[in-house]
Image: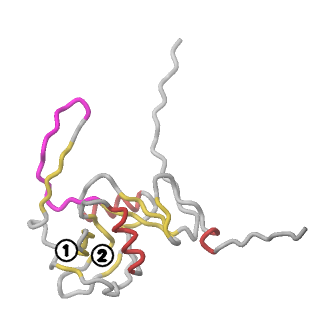
Amino acid sequence: RKEEKAIVSPEAAYAACPRDWIGFGSKCFYFSEHTSNWTSSQTSCMQLGAHLTHFDSLEDLNFLHRYMGESATWIGLHRESSEHPWMWTDNTEYNNLVPIRGDGQHAYLTDRGISSGRKYILKKILTIHTPGTSLRRLRKTGTRKFIASLSTETQPPTFQPKIREKNARN
């Protein structure tokens, strides 16, 4: 009987993604459920050992569109002003794969492409529910969900929230 050798693709050699993240290519993606401004979103990503996402191809962009839902979502593009080039959070220059509409300093992904705008234009109605209270509608300015990403080429840090243990009483 002939011995069969398993063929391992390069993708299989990458580390597994943390829980609640989605793997695609050599990256893991986390699609937030919470909204905040661009700077706070980047800070949240860094606390997860990641950064606001970037993409290098239309294939990556199509993947992001498939999973992001209907909300406009922050990505890792920013610039100092409309006179400066768009930069990713890792300080590499954006390759203009897809044009960015608007004249803001931070970019976000929509179902129609990539946009940016001034804070006073970016208004979104959010429905916020706190357990034990009634639903209320609040107007938030410049807040969006975000997408974090990290490379699986090295072992990613895992984020584990602290769990309070109850003292056992007999």
The color scheme shown is secondary structure
Residue at 41%, 59% in the rendered image: 30
The answer to whether 95 appears left or right of 132 in the picture is right
Mark 2–mark 1 Cα distance, whole angstroms, equals: 9 Å
Q: Residues within 10 Å of mark 2 (few under 14, many from 20)?
A: many
Dot 2 amino acid type: Leu
Q: Is residue 83 above or below residue 169?
A: below
- The dot on residue 77 is 2
Of residue 139 and residue 5, the one placed in the foreground of this image is 5
Mark 2 or 1, nearer chain start = 2
Query: In the rendered structure, does residue 143 fall within the stretch colored magenta?
Result: yes
Q: Residue at x 35, y 85 (%)?
A: 93
The residue labelled by disc 1 is 116
**Left or right, residue 6 beside residue 51:** right
Residue contact between numbered discs 2 and 1, judged by CB atoms under 8 Å: yes
The residue range painted magenta reads 131-145
Report helix, strand or loop for mark 1: strand
Amino acid at circle 1: Ser
- Mark seen at residue 15: none
Q: At x 9% / y 67%, what residue is drawn? A: 121
